[in-house]
Amino acid sequence: MKLTVCSLAPLFDFYSVDRPVRWEEAFGRRAPLHVEIGFGMGEVLLRRAREFPHINFVGIEYHWERIYKTVKAIDRANRAARPGEGPGNIRILRLNAWIAFERLFAERSVEHIYSLFPCPWPKKGHIKHRLFSREFLGLLNNRLTDNGTLHVVTDYYPYSEWVKEENDPVDFHLQAEDIPAQFGTKFEKKWIEEGQEEFFEINLLKNKHRACTVREDCELKSYKLTEFDPDKFSFEDVRGEVAVVLKDRIFDRDQQRMMLRVIVSEQHLTQNFWAMLKREDGFWRLCKMEGQHFFPTPGINTALEEIHLAAVGRQTVRHNN
């Protein structure tokens, strides 16, 4: 089996820096910032980075296979180029786009956003999963510079009509037209093979700035328990605006340490989080486990609070609304 080795330099570790990200520091230069949502196999992201070396590009994608293929393509391009002439102006985020724009981008920091063939969620019951809702468009409006632009192309006509309906004309001036195939992506080629000749383009030009806060990290709680019986520990899952579900527990009797993995869901963010109860200096301490990546949010604090209540035998089934 041949082992493929490539540089992971384009992958950006957004957990290890202050947020929102200072993108001029991440790229080592000040330049206009363009963001592609859902870059797929990276065909357009890489092509535009080559064509516009004076622009900084951030690509957002969640599927590891697509990210891996894109990173390999970037690495091949860098190896083939002369020193200093490769596409070093790309940073990749593996993250939900909504969370990325909420937490990693400051107001008026992005000049252009584009998304080619986003998932249209065609079933009626799945419309709630569509990305370019009125609320999300408002968030993008805030992150775009004055006169910034948003470009969306879809293969599904009802989706283009839905985006038009979601747009607030006060926020964006909208232009739409039917266009031929022109991007050369894997998905576009697939639809061409199936006989589709026209696609649906939406261009949104920012009219007026909308207020929208950047979600900031919060200071996490820790607890000190004078008494705790690991054998009697019981946790009831919490439902509501913040949901906390216990998935795993591991108790090391020799080290007197219990580790708890919970799933915490709040707003658009769902996170795996490990908490720890450890006996030290005659008491039990409840806190986060070190060595994990997560956003410190009010939901994480809710999880710690509920674990504390369960540990002291005072947790009740709650629905926080």
Image (cartoon, helix red, strand yellow):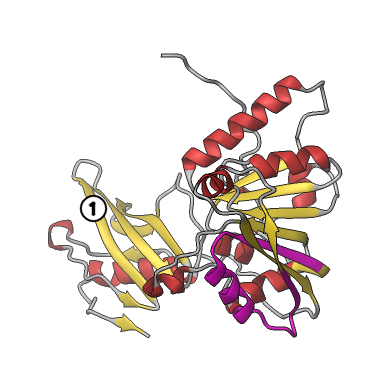
Q: Is residue 195 left or right of residue 88?
A: left
Above or below: residue 135 compared with residue 287: below
Image quarter hosting the C terminus: bottom left
The residue depicted at 47 percent of the width and 73 percent of the height is 267
Q: Is residue 78 left or right of residue 297?
A: right
**SS category of the residue bearing label 1:** strand
The residue depicted at 18 percent of the width and 63 percent of the height is 233
Q: Is residue 310 left or right of residue 48?
A: left
Would you call the spot at circle 1 few (<14 residues within 10 Å), some (14-19), or many (20 or more)?
few
Percent x, y of residue 271 = 42, 59
Task: Inspect the magenta stretch and tell me whether residue 154 lies in it.
Answer: yes
In the displayed image of the protein, which residue is found farthest to the left?
231
Percent x, y of residue 215 = 60, 69
Say which residue label 1 marks.
Answer: 249
Residue in front for this viewpoint, 161 or 266 = 161
The residue depicted at 80 percent of the width and 42 percent of the height is 28
Number of numbered discs:
1
The kind of residue tagged 1 is Arg
Q: Is residue 243 visible?
A: yes
Task: Inspect the magenta stretch and tell me whether residue 270 lies in it.
Answer: no
Percent x, y of residue 155 = 56, 59
Residue range corresponding to the magenta coloring? 148-176
Q: Quadrant of residue 161?
A: bottom right
